[in-house]
Amino acid sequence: MTDERVNGPGDGLSYEQARAELASVVERLEAGGTSLEESLALWERGERLAEICQGWLDGARQRIDTVRQARESAPG
């Protein structure tokens, strides 16, 4: 079983890898010159990469919130 808190969500990509690939996809789409089929495939890949990035960000936010809650509830 994969622990997404350690390995990250989806496709085995780190946040930085997914973000870099997403930027590349956006550049290719903005440049144009691709067929409709290729444009659709790029768009679909971009959507998946955006989901992966969001998963990493959501996980980071959850970890931060967990630490904050633990500190607030700790006697002290």
Image (cartoon, rainbow, N blue to C red):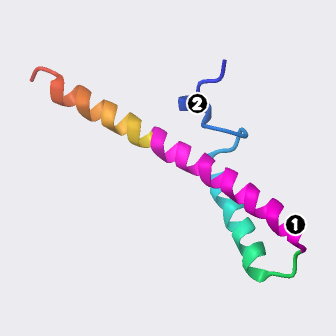
Residue 24 at what x, y percent from top left? 73, 67
Q: Which residues are magenta?
A: 35-59
Given residues 50 and 75, the one toward you in this image is: 50
Confirm whether residue 15 shows in the render: no
Question: Label for residue 21?
Answer: none
- Disc 2 or 1, which lies upstream in sequence? 2
Report the residue that reaches farthest toward the left: 76
What residue is drawn where x is 59% and y is 24%? Answer: 3
Q: Main secondary structure of the magenta part?
A: helix
Image vertical order of residue 61 relative to residue 19, above or below: above
Q: Quadrant of the N terminus?
A: top right
Where does label 1 land, which residue? Answer: 38
What element does badge 2 sit on? helix
Is 60 part of what is drawn in magenta?
no
Is 55 part of what is drawn in magenta?
yes
What residue is drawn where x is 53% and y is 49%? Answer: 54
Residue 74 at what x, y percent from top left? 17, 22
